[in-house]
Image: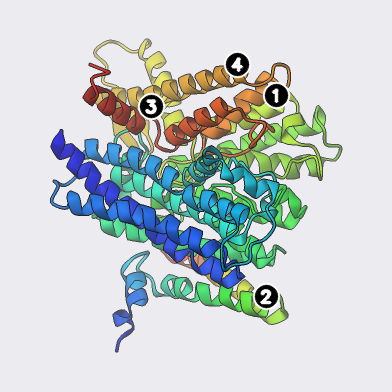
Amino acid sequence: MKSRDIPVVSAVLEAGADDRVFDSLLLTGPLVIGLVVVFGRSLVTEAVAIAYIAAFVGYTLYRGVRT
Amino acid sequence: MNGAVATVGRDLGRILEALGGLMLISLVVPIVWGEYFALPALLVSALVPLGIGWVLYRRFEGAEAPGRFHGMIVAASGWFSVGIFGSLPFLLIAWSVQLGVPGFSTPAQTATLAAFTEPLNAIFESMSGFTGTGLTMTDNEEVLPRTLQWWRTFSEWVGGVGVIVLTTAILSRPGSGSLTLYESEARSKKIHPSIVSTVRTIWWIFILFTFGSILALWLAGMPIWGAINHGMTGLATGGFSITDNSIATYDSVAIDFVLIPIMLLGSIAFPVHYLILQGDLRNFYSDLQTRWVFGYMGIGSALLWAFLYFAGPYETPFAALRYGLFQFVSAATCTGFQTAVDATNVALGRWPSYAQLTVTFGMFVGGAAGSTAGGIKLIRGLTLVKGIRHQIADVFYPESAVRRLEINNRRLNEEEASREFMEAAIIVVLWSTFLVLGTFLLLLTLPSGEYSLANVLFEVASAQGNVGLSSGITGPDSLPTIGKIAFLFHMWIGRLEIIPVLVMLRTIFKRGGVYR
């Protein structure tokens, strides 16, 4: 079974900016927020949240510079 | 005309079905928070629009595809219907708590929730949510059941996507900004060729930004439930809060400054976001509206800072910057989050009149077309300014001269320029007319001497611009019934950019024989 065959994943992959990194960020977003809801504020959850935002901002800038 | 009724009825049915679906999804919230008393009310609220929508859709399933005329009527009647039926959770949950639900334990009734036992208050809250306004009939949002806190947030978030879809995919026409954006993208790409794929991509971008906003607010120190709600309403430039004093409740510099880029994201046209995510960062400065989002918000904030520091209520430059910048961005993006309240500093309604009018100007202009922001939209303001300059300069050229008006990298000939200029002028004239009429009506109905003209103008501009900032007039007891009904109308026409509502009303009156 390919990732494209999973209902939610296929909808995400078909829409948007046609970029796997952004698609991955969209798919992992609920997981990161779920992690925060379940485990609350801790060094680990804060690090994960920072990594998420850094990945989004950094990758947007990287694409802009590369294009 | 009967064909038009069928087409509108079919599409309206689909919209009501979708609304019912949103309420069914929201059933998760009372389950997670243990507010089981809200389950029957929310379920009934969902079944009503689902049932009506199902009947309408089945009845008119074979109707013709909608044209632009149908699109406008569907948008106007759809937003109105969603505002009406979206009030059911407020009304039914308030009555559930008031009367008790057999088999479920209910919390004690609060004055805030009791306000929603009045249908007009419930409809006001729902219309405020779905139009992304944020004016509220609650005294203290903190004591609302989590289910209703969520429903308010969710209505603004969905309404935010709705208006982007409306302007970028359905009502694209000269002067609306959407067509302007598309045509200016000859140097780059359109979002997607079809409406369906465009809508999917708008959702994709909106959801991605929502996740980022929620996590950024949480990192700034907001509790996660607050971050979820304020992240959603901030990006949707709606402005509903779950706290008593809006964002001032947190009294946090970090949260204030994290919310500013979130509100700005919501006020930039989503086709531009798409291009930026594609790597075309030039759009930050090459796109006229985006350039002006930063330009005029910078100028407006600087002006407000000067008013608040040199002649106003704040003693330090930083305090004036913090509250001035936040409130101008909140107003001009049409979000309506408030940090200037008496609990922590000086309430907006007690700022000097010229500071209030500066904020009112921000609400009047609004953000970019194709975004979630309200107001007349930047592209219309810029089209008017450039058009007026073009007309005046015309005097200095010989009659045989061929001149073109350049807007957003598009060179318009005389006919195109005239059409876009006229459309922008019509919207601005209509907007201003309704603003003046609403101000006049409110002045007549409010207790004399209690509010200044600046307060009243501010409040009406806030309702019509879908902003939600308040000078203290809006409330379940402070706003008279006529004022509430007038604000429902202001919020509705403001969200739909007036013309679709007028088209719908003309069609109804003409059909009813009132207007010929």
Residue B28 drawn at (x, y percent): 50, 69
Is the C-beta separation of discs 4 and 3 under 8 Å? no
- Direction from residue B93 to residue B82 in the image, left or right: left
Q: State the SS at label 3.
A: helix
Q: Is residue B82 above or below residue B417?
A: below
**Which residue matches tag 3?**
B424
Q: State the SS at label 1.
A: helix
**Which residue matches tag 1?**
B354
What type is the residue that disc 3 sits on? Ala
Residue B118 drawn at (x, y percent): 56, 40
What type is the residue that disc 2 sits on? Glu
Write down the chain letter for disc 3: B
Query: Residue B448 occupies which quadrant of the picture?
Result: top right
Q: Earlier in the sequence, mark 3 or mark 1?
A: 1
Q: State the SS at label 4.
A: helix
- Direction from residue B135 to residue B478 in the image, left or right: right
* Same subunit, tags 4 and 3: yes
Q: Nearer the viewer, residue B450 or A43?
A: B450
Quarter of the rendering occupied by the N terminus of chain B: top left
- Direction from residue B148 to residue B303 in the image, left or right: right
**Dot label at residue B368:** none
In three-dimensional space, the C-alpha distance between marks 4 and 2, rounded to whole angstroms, equals 53 Å
* Same subunit, tags 1 and 2: no
Q: Earlier in the sequence, mark 4 or mark 3?
A: 3
In three-dimensional space, the C-alpha distance between marks 2 and 3, rounded to whole angstroms, equals 47 Å
In three-dimensional space, the C-alpha distance between marks 4 and 3, rounded to whole angstroms, equals 30 Å
Circle 3 Cα neighbour tier, 10 Å, few/some/many (<14 / 14–19 / ≥20)? many
Residue lying furthest front in this view? Answer: B102
